[in-house]
């Protein structure tokens, strides 16, 4: 599984994930998240939780 797929799988749970969770996959996780947004159409929010501390959360559609 490539880095993009690993990050996509991690974010698919809809929970916020910190850089500490993403760095073990790749140091360039921001580039991967940007690609998931722009190339693949995923809605991924960047949420500021403190000064220079962010979490990333994929907004997943709830099925009825």
Image (cartoon, rainbow, N blue to C red):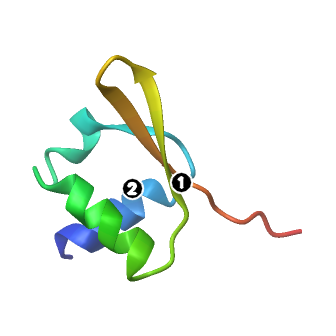
Horizontal and vertical percent for residue 52?
29, 24
The residue that appears at 50% across and 61% down in the rendered structure is: 12
| Secondary element at tag 2 | helix
**Tag 1 near tag 2, CB within 8 Å:** yes
Report, in whole angstroms, how far the alpha carbon at label 1 lies from the one at label 2: 7 Å
Where residue 60 appears, as percent x and y from the top left, is: 64, 62
Q: Is residue 9 left or right of residue 14?
A: left
**64 in relation to 25, above or below:** below
Can you say which quadrant of the picture contains the N terminus?
bottom left
State left or right for residue 47 relative to residue 36.
Answer: right
Residue holding disc 1: 13
1 in relation to 21, above or below = below
Give whichever of 51, 3 is nearer the camera: 51
Residue at (37, 32) in percent of width and height:
54
Determine which quarter of the picture holds residue 46. top left
Residue topped by disc 2: 10
């Amino acid at each position: 599984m490539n880095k993009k797929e690993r990050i996509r799988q991690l974010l698919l749970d809809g929970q916020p994930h910190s850089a500490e969770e993403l760095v073990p996959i790749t140091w360039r996780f921001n580039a991967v998240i940007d690609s998931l947004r722009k190339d693949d159409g995923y809605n991924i929010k960047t949420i500021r939780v403190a000064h220079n501390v962010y979490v990333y959360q994929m907004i997943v559609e709830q099925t009825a």
